[in-house]
Image: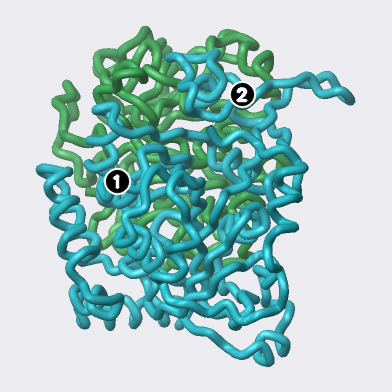
């Protein structure tokens, strides 16, 4: 259960890290070693945007187990976590491939059979849970989820019994106004994986476009792995420090992975690989388990490296995604 | 992000329209909801019909409508033919005034900067509570749906317009699970639960437009769409839905409204 860490423990973990300005560039395989079985893993991006798929791919290949995984909204990577056996417990606000593909058959298969947990919080609750973690406080108050069964499932007073594996939210009477407020517990992930457009070797990351919850997630986590479209010099970062959104002091690993979100998008560079996502939806439509395993074999286990993975998705797809993604703000 | 895809398999509805309509049920929904949006408003829109309707309003009577997307987008103008697959991709950001984090845009609801929340729903009940989480018993669900996304936050904090297909299995006496709160058990139970602001304003369906009684907070018909009888709307509702004898009939979609919608969504992602 992802309840808030004791403050002394949080501070101790931070103090124990090497937070110096040092070169952190490494391979996907080396970065995967920073994730331990049983960790709480937070995933940056949202739905089909800036999903750190290359890192997830490496974690699947490294056969990580018993992870609890959180994200603002989960798309196909949630299916992958279940089907590859990395996690049986996902914490998010919404989980399916995307509305145009309907409800995820893999998610339904795992959750309806009781084989896996999908711990549901409102989207703002996810945001404030990461923010509380980023602020170093054990909770934040908010004004939604009250009266709903979404609250019931994480506090035990709504429809259906609350799952004891889920974190609990609590209501309180405001000491200043007497109003009813909801307190949501902080998330301090053991590891965060975040994909960015560019960063330097120290981990100073500049994000373009939508930042989702990534800045809070980086601050909340006890370790951060950045994957990046390209590593740039520290001099280049220092020319535009106002664009730096994630500071080096939170970062433990930097991995350069072009097209590191494929088949999802990376703002300003490429859009989702729609044909591939259609193909995935078709593969998992009839027999979700067999389809997902077949997909994992072809795209996760067989490729010899990330470039081979991209080759299997296909050059035509890659060019199309890049053409659409780089033209998004054209007249 | 909200969804209504799980229940989208065609179901027989006993409608008695005079003629074959020149528009789909989804197009009717989009047009009727767009007309409820007013110039100058700030609307928090989900993907699908709400997004289409908000863009349609921008292109007709409300060019100054500010759309908010959950992904952290303030005031975009989405391009025709390039509808986003969710509210969280870069397509949502075109010609926006401002991009912020997800948490920041959701906090605008809590702070009170949003006039209208606008979304779809899989299942709704008499008091406007919405379910997009579970069909059947949540402990052993028949269908696990994608969940709340920002739906619960929007419904908890803003005046709501909901657009959905009018079917008996969607309009139920009591939802299997309250994902997004309407008026809970009616009366003042919503405020008592700690939700003093917002609440259900309108429910737009392919049969009519519904509102909520000022005191009991129960759903009631405000207007019927052309060719829809009181009998037909009651037959497609799983609870007692009052229809006033003098309920007005809405104006059918115009050629202009339909042509804008078809230009926006040529692939019929959301209007099939």
User: For chain B, what colour was chosen?
Assistant: green
Among the chains pictured, the one given cyan colouring is: A
Q: Is residue B206 left or right of residue A210?
A: left
Mark 1, residues whose alpha carbon is within 10 Å: few (<14), some, or many (≥20)? some
1 or 2: tag closer to the N-terminus = 1
Query: What chain is tagged by disc 1?
Result: A
- In the image shown, does B232 or A136 lie closer to the viewer? A136
- Secondary structure of the residue carrying tag 2 is loop
Q: Is residue A12 above or below residue A117?
A: below
Render colour scheme: by chain
Q: Is residue B168 above or below residue B197?
A: above
Q: Is residue B185 left or right of residue B30?
A: right
| Residue B174 image offset from top left, x and y in percent | 40, 12
**Separation of residues labelled 1 and 2 (CA atoms):** 34 Å
Q: Residue at x 76, y 41 (%)?
A: A7
- Judging by the rendered image, the residue that carries numbered circle 1 is A85
- In the image shown, does A145 or B108 lie closer to the viewer? A145
Q: Is residue B123 above or below residue A44?
A: above
Of the residues tagged 1 and 2, which is closer to the observer?
1
Query: What chain is tagged by disc 2?
Result: A
Q: Residue at x 21, y 79 (%)?
A: A311
The circle on residue A146 is: 2
| Residue A50 image offset from top left, x and y in percent | 45, 65
The circle on residue A21 is: none
Say which quarter of the image contains residue B120: top left
Say which quarter of the image contains residue B269: bottom left
| Residue B175 image offset from top left, x and y in percent | 39, 17
Among all residues in the image, which is located at the extreme right?
A176
């Amino acid at each position: 259960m992802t309840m808030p860490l004791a403050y002394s423990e949080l501070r101790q973990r931070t103090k124990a890290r090497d937070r110096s300005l040092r070169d952190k560039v490494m391979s996907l395989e080396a970065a995967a070693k920073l994730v331990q079985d049983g960790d709480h893993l937070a995933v940056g991006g949202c739905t089909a945007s800036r999903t750190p798929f290359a890192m997830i791919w490496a974690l699947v290949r490294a056969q990580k187990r018993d992870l609890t995984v959180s994200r603002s909204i989960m798309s196909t990577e949630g299916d992958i976590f279940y089907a590859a056996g990395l996690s049986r417990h996902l914490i998010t606000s919404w989980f399916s491939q995307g509305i145009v593909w309907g409800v995820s058959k893999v998610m339904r298969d795992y959750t309806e059979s009781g084989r896996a947990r999908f711990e549901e919080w409102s989207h703002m609750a996810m945001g404030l849970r990461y923010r509380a973690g980023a602020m170093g406080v054990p909770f934040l108050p908010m004004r939604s989820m009250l009266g709903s069964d979404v609250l019931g499932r994480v506090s035990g007073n709504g429809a259906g019994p609350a799952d004891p594996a889920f974190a609990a939210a609590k209501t309180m009477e405001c000491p200043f106004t007497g109003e009813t407020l909801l307190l949501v517990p902080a998330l301090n992930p053991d590891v965060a994986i975040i994909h960015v457009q560019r960063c330097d070797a120290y981990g100073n990351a500049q994000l373009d476009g939508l930042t989702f919850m990534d800045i809070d997630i980086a601050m909340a986590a006890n370790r951060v792995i950045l994957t990046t479209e390209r590593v740039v010099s520290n001099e280049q970062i220092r020319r535009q420090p106002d664009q730096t959104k994630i500071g080096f002091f939170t970062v433990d690993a930097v991995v350069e992975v072009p097209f590191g979100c494929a088949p999802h998008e990376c703002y300003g560079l490429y859009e989702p690989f729609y044909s591939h996502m259609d193909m995935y939806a078709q593969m998992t439509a009839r027999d979700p388990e067999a389809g997902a395993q077949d997909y994992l074999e072809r795209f996760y286990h067989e490729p010899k490296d990330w470039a081979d993975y991209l080759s299997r998705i296909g050059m035509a797809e890659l060019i199309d995604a890049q053409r659409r993604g780089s033209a998004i703000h054209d007249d | 992000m909200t969804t209504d895809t799980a229940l989208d398999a065609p179901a027989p509805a006993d409608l008695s329209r005079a003629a074959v309509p020149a528009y789909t049920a989804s197009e009717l929904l989009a047009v009727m909801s767009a007309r409820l949006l007013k110039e100058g408003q700030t609307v928090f829109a989900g993907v699908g019909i709400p997004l289409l309707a908000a863009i349609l309003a921008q292109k007709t009577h409300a060019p100054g409508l500010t759309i908010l997307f959950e992904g952290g987008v303030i005031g975009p103008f989405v391009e025709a033919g390039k509808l986003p697959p969710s509210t969280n991709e870069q397509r949502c950001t075109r010609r926006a005034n401002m991009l912020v984090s997800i948490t920041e845009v959701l906090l605008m609801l809590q702070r009170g900067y949003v006039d209208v929340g606008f979304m779809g729903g899989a299942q709704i009940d008499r008091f406007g509570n919405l379910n997009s989480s579970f069909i059947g018993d949540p402990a052993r669900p028949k269908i696990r749906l994608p969940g709340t996304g920002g739906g619960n936050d929007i419904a908890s904090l803003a005046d709501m317009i909901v657009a959905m297909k009018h079917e008996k299995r969607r309009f139920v006496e009591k939802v299997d699970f309250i994902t997004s709160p309407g008026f809970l058990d009616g009366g003042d139970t919503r405020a008592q639960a700690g939700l003093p602001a917002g609440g259900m304003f309108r429910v737009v369906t392919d049969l009519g437009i519904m509102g909520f009684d000022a005191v009991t907070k129960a759903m009631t018909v405000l207007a019927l769409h052309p060719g829809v009888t009181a009998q037909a709307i009651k037959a497609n509702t799983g609870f007692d839905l009052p229809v006033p004898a003098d309920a007005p009939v809405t104006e059918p979609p115009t050629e202009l409204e339909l042509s804008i919608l078809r230009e926006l969504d040529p692939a019929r992602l959301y209007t099939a």
